Amino acid sequence: MEIDARLLQFGGSLIAILVLAWLALALRLGPRPKLVGHHDAAQAAGEVQDGFAAVESAVAADGSAAVLRDPVGKIMVLKEHGTHFAGRVLTASARASIEGNTLSIDSGERRFGAVTLNIEAPQAWADAINRLGKR
Amino acid sequence: MIDLPAFSVTQIAVPLFVAAILIEMAWAKYRARDAYEPKDTLVSLAFGLGSTVSGALFGGFALAIFIGAYEYRLFDISENWWGPLWAWPLVFVLDDLKYYWVHRAGHRIRWMWAAHVNHHSSQHYNLSTALRQTWTGSFTFGFILALPLVLLGFHPGMIAVCGAINLVYQFWIHTEAIDRMPRWFEAVMNTPSHHRVHHATNPRYLDRNYAGVFIVWDKMFGTFEPEREDEQIRYGIIKQLGSFNLLWAVFHEWIGMIGDIWRAPWRHKLSYLLREPGWTHDNSRETSDMIRERWRERTNASDGLGEGGQIPVADRNPIADSPEAA
């Protein structure tokens, strides 16, 4: 009897949380963020790692991601995550590939996932990222 | 056989939680649409639901310890969980003091942080974030800090009720919809403003404002930091997850910690369990203290303003330009 009541409570709670999440969707909460140019990307990078001073960046055409380099050659990738951005300073386990103008970056962290950016001249970035593994 | 309350304070409060989230969503619709994100909300609420299951499955261990310890109490304060009346304010305040230290340990000891990080892993700060409760708290040792209360003679049921009221109190402070409470209230109580600081990843704010109900503990023990108008907050954890995978959000720090212990030289293994998050034996990562120190050196100013008065942190806090309470 007690188990039945608990199951009922669990089921009711599950329905309630699904309804609340659906409501957030229906109210169009959580607009996608957009990076507009170097300043935006550099600021977001400074939030990911305090003090990261980007001197060069490439922002995806749709503003959903960016790749940046600081004065000592550290490279950071940013991707949209909900209404914010999340990022990683790339390490030797990172890999990059290109297809046309699309740069695909695998940060080396499976759960962070791959980031794709449509940018001009992606080759230089891909080379720089792939060089991280050869240092 | 010890008698325990036949009700759950937190379960009674659930309709209130739902109603308050609905109201905050309506506020967000018109004032700050980025205060909520559907997937983030779903993850936060799933955390809340899962934590009730986890508590039902594993919470009995701590309770059994309390009941056992109660047999060795110093004073007979009450024979049952509901009395005497004079004991309630006393146990509530003492339990809140206990909460402060458990919470502080939750941020300063990686074993504890592995469970508590769940509550901080959202980059949003809203009432659904309050329900982002741990599934793995029973696998830490925070409950030990409640033992002195039990040994003093406070009934375990009474302590449990106070703990639940404490948790329910903390629900409403997870919001950006309220700017500041009256000055007298801000001085004594934990508030949305104080707790926003606690959830911030700005270097200045890291590991500050651990209070549950009374902010006076932080002021007393040197961990208080007021929210500043000129420094806008970013929320979450130092290494943001970048994923809405619920199970990853629940277990990522446990996996990271166990991996670190596994790989570490023998003489450092225990440190990965008991030292602060971010500590490494080879300085390959940073603790909150190291991040704050580096930030201080970089900005070259104790008040946090960088060169030329630039604010070195994010400016995405929607309440920043609307100082009046919503």
Image: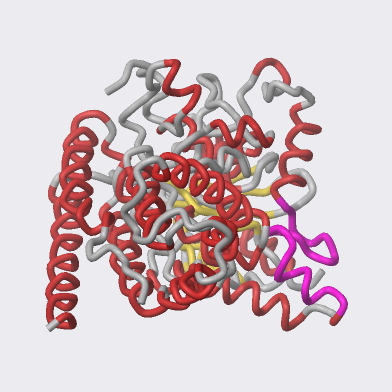
**Magenta residues, dominant SS class:** loop
> What residue lies at 56% left-to-right and 43% top-to-bottom?
B210
Indicate the colouring scheme: secondary structure
Q: Is residue B314 left or right of residue B29?
A: right
Name the quadrant of the N terminus of chain A.
bottom left
Magenta highlight on residue B277:
yes
* Span colored in magenta: B267-287
Q: Is residue B74 above or below residue B296?
A: below
Q: Is residue B33 left or right of residue A127?
A: left
Q: Is residue A78 left or right of residue B175?
A: right
Q: Is residue A108 above or below residue B239?
A: below
What percent of the width, then of the height, locates residue B299? 74, 28
What percent of the width, then of the height, locates residue B202? 59, 38
Q: Is residue B66 left or right of residue B85?
A: right
> What residue lies at 82% left-to-right and 69% top-to-bottom?
A135
> What residue lies at 39% left-to-right and 50% top-to-bottom?
B162
Q: Is residue A97 visible?
A: no
Residue A52 in which image quadrant? top right
The answer to which of B231 and B93 lies nearer the viewer is B93
